[in-house]
Image (spheres, rainbow, N blue to C red):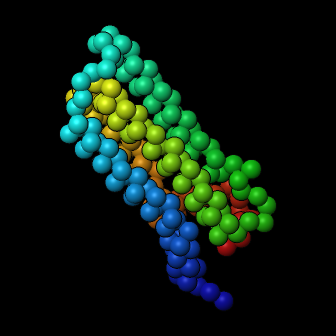
Amino acid sequence: MTTAFERDREERQAIRRYTRPALLVGISALITVVVYALLARLITPEPLFSPRKLETLFSIVVLVITLIMIIILAVRKTVYYSSRLIREGMNIDDVLRKWNTVDIVLIGITETIPLLGLALTWIGVPFARTWFIFLVSALLLVILMPMGIKVRGKLMILRQQHPDLNA
């Protein structure tokens, strides 16, 4: 018979084992956001379009970024506990594997945000107008990265919804 401490230790080890790939992808994405921001800051080309067209492009890209963020956060809120993802008879390892895949996909989609900021800067929008795009994407990546305490909290919520979940 295992004690509660041993079960918690095994769960923490499983969390570390199955969230490590997504965590490494998230850290790599954070590093690329910093690199993109540095590139955008250091390279300031001449504007390719008129100021009015640049303003219109800037507004469209900010709207697209806002929509991407809303979609990512909505998917994140709903897919983790979806009955399509969590099936009858699954154990914690299966759930963590599926969550790892979801985390990597969401982090990958988030990576488009700093790319859009870099593209804006390269077509002539000043870095003083695009810096917040890099900051927002870095914050979103930190929110999406599967850190141990966040995964344990999600597992607690999952166990309340699925008390039959196997350990």
Left or right: where does residue 167 sit relative to residue 37? right
Q: Nearer the viewer, residue 59 or 2?
A: 59
Which residue is more in the foreground, 125 or 9? 125
How many numbered circles are shown? 0
Query: Extreme right residue here?
Result: 88
Q: Estimate the x, y position of residue 18 in percent, counting from the top left.
A: 56, 68
Residue 124 in view in this figure: yes
- The percent position of residue 112, horizontal first and vertical second, equals 46, 40
Residue drawn at x 74%, y 50% as measured from the top left: 84
Q: Residue at x 68, y 66 (%)?
A: 94
State which quadrant residue 116 falls in: top left
- Asked if residue 55 shows in the view, the reply is no
Q: In this view, does 160 lie above or below 6?
A: above
Q: Looking at the picture, does residue 119 appear above or below residue 4? A: above
Vertical comparison of 78 with 63: above or below: below
Up/down of 160 relative to 15, above or below: above
Is residue 88 shown left or right of residue 31?
right
Query: Residue at the location (48% across, 27% down)?
Result: 64
What residue is drawn where x is 31% and y is 20%? 48
Q: Position of residue 123 (x, y in %)?
A: 33, 26
Residue farthest along the bottom direction in this orientation: 1
Instruction: Using residue 97 as the reference point, say whether residue 164 is left or right of it.
Output: right
Could you tell me which quadrant the N terminus lies in? Answer: bottom right
**Percent from the top left, x then y, of residue 90?**
74, 65
